[in-house]
């Protein structure tokens, strides 16, 4: 086994898959005919109704034996549509089985681009093989896309480069619910994928935009972490901006990445945000790369 496959075996991607393989799937009803499934990588939102189930994000394939009954528990509607918030494996790995089950797949054009080819994510020390043809989005868009299903108007909007270069938000208009994908990890320092166009400033811009379109009543579905509201999203925004400034100042002083990590620019936030996959040191390095 060479060094790179060793890294792949012990890295973040296998860790996420092992977690999904063991996790039970929890179902959280939100508002109207919208629910969220938790326990298979990124959050999976489900809109039920006469036009068939619409899912946002697909989770990991290893979760299919638990995701399928969870979907059945919501309604008997067939699965007819899937939207991907971005290209990452913890949101798209289940595309193939959901497509086989009946879902047309809608995503940003860069999601299709990255899934279509071999793609390296340096931050995960992992190279993804091209996804099978049946896992690829069947409808793509560049800036915005609207659709209507189950008496619900959905607006899909591209953030511009943020966590990757393929991130979109999805708004359920009548229900006042927004899914923001990995622009928000609620309660955790977020991963930022510089290999496919992400950056700290892109994350901050996406979060600023999210704050501009929600109200105190809006239900916000993050990519990871609990469903929450504007107050909690505001805390996240303030954290991103403060750490970005701390790290930028150290870099301006000429500190190396190791010296910047040693200076603990995230210290005030670590107890609250630094307890998941992205440790304070990893997150500091991610921010340093973008300032
Ligand atoms: Zn992601």
Image (tube, helix red, strand yellow):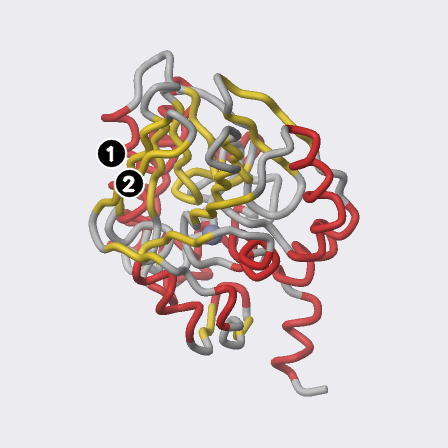
| Residue 260 visible to the viewer | no
- Looking at the rendered image, the quarter that the N terminus falls into is bottom right
Q: Is residue 286 left or right of residue 291?
A: right
To which residue does mark 1 refer? Answer: 209
Q: Extreme right residue here?
A: 22
Q: Give whichever of 4, 137 is nearer the camera.
A: 137
Residue 220, percent from left and from top: 43, 26
The quadrant where residue 154 appears: top left
To which residue does mark 2 refer? Answer: 206
Q: Is residue 87 left or right of residue 9?
A: left
Q: Is residue 260 left or right of residue 6?
A: left
Q: In the structure shown, which secondary structural element does the residue marked by tag 2 occupy?
A: helix
- Looking at the rendered image, the quarter that the C terminus falls into is bottom left
Q: Decide: is 16 above or below 8.
A: above
Give me the residue at 43% from left, 21% from top: 219
Disc 2 and disc 1 in contact, CB within 8 angstroms:
yes
Give me the residue at 55% from left, 44% from top: 79
The quadrant where residue 246 appears: top left
Q: Extreme left residue here?
A: 143
Q: Residues within 10 Å of mark 1 (few under 14, many from 20)?
A: few
């Amino acid at each position: 086994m060479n060094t790179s496959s060793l890294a792949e075996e012990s890295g973040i991607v296998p860790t996420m898959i092992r977690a999904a393989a063991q996790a039970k799937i929890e179902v959280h009803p939100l508002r109207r005919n919208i629910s969220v499934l938790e326990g298979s990588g990124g959050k999976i939102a489900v809109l039920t109704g006469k036009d068939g189930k619409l899912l946002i994000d697909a989770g990991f394939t290893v979760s299919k034996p638990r995701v399928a009954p969870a979907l059945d528990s919501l309604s008997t509607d067939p699965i007819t549509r899937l939207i991907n918030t971005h290209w990452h494996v913890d949101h798209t790995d289940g595309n193939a089985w959901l497509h086989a089950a009946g879902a047309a797949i809608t995503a940003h054009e860069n999601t299709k681009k990255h899934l279509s080819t071999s793609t390296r994510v340096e931050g995960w020390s992992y190279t993804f093989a091209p996804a099978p043809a049946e896992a690829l989005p069947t409808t793509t868009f560049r800036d915005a896309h609207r659709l209507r299903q189950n008496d619900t108007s959905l607006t899909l909007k591209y953030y511009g480069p943020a966590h990757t270069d393929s991130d979109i938000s999805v708004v359920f208009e009548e229900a006042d619910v927004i899914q923001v994908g990995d622009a928000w990890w609620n309660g955790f320092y977020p991963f930022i994928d510089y290999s496919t166009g992400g950056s700290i400033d892109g994350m901050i811009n996406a979060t600023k935009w999210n704050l501009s379109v929600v109200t105190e009543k809006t239900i916000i579905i993050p990519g990871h972490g609990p469903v929450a509201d504007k107050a909690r999203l505001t805390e996240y925004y303030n954290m991103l901006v403060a750490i970005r400034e701390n790290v930028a100042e150290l870099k301006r002083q000429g500190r190396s990445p190791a010296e910047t990590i040693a200076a603990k620019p995230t210290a005030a936030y670590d107890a609250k945000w630094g307890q998941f996959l992205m440790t304070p040191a990893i997150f500091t390095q991610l921010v340093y790369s973008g300032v």
